[in-house]
Image (spheres, rainbow, N blue to C red):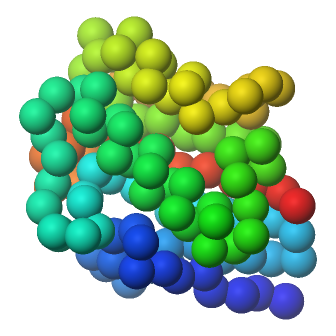
Amino acid sequence: MKTIIKTEKAPKPIGPYSQAVLVNDTLYISGQIAFDPATGNLITINIIQETSQVMHNLLNILEAAGMHFSNVVKTTIFLKDMNDFPHMNEVYEQFFEKDFPARETVQVAGLPRGVNVEISMIAVR
């Protein structure tokens, strides 16, 4: 059984996809970029603030599904510039208390709307 998860506390999709899809007890969250859902503006001042906005968007989607970062088992991080890795990582780790999820981080040639970071997640109840 598939349930579409959506919340006004996270950016609306900019294409034909859902914020997240819940299948049984597994939540698949689409890649999130640093849109501020309150203003609709992109946060691209620096990688720290950009990553923080992405993580808050992910948190809001997790909460809409009745979950938290402790439920996350896998993340995928796309960076425009791998030199941003240490700063992104500083922010990322603050959202987890222990038992970090599996993860890969890759540098890509480009991301939607010219952002510097995009993160997707898989969580399990």
Residue 31 on image: x %, y %? 45, 55
The answer to whether any part of residue 102 appears in the image is no
Q: Nearer the viewer, residue 78 or 101?
A: 101
Residue 33 on image: x %, y %? 32, 52
Above or below residue 38? Residue 102 is above
Above or below residue 88? Residue 125 is below
Q: Nearer the viewer, residue 95 or 123?
A: 95
Q: Nearer the viewer, residue 70 or 111?
A: 70
Residue depicted at x 25% and y 21%: 81
Residue depicted at x 71% and y 87%: 3
Q: How many marks?
A: 0
The answer to whether any part of residue 5 appears in the image is yes
Q: Quadrant of residue 93?
A: top right
Residue 39 on image: x %, y %? 16, 68
Residue 78 on image: x %, y %? 40, 36
Above or below residue 39? Residue 33 is above
Residue 79 vs residue 2: left or right?
left
Residue depicted at x 55% and y 26%: 94
Residue 17 vs residue 104: left or right?
left
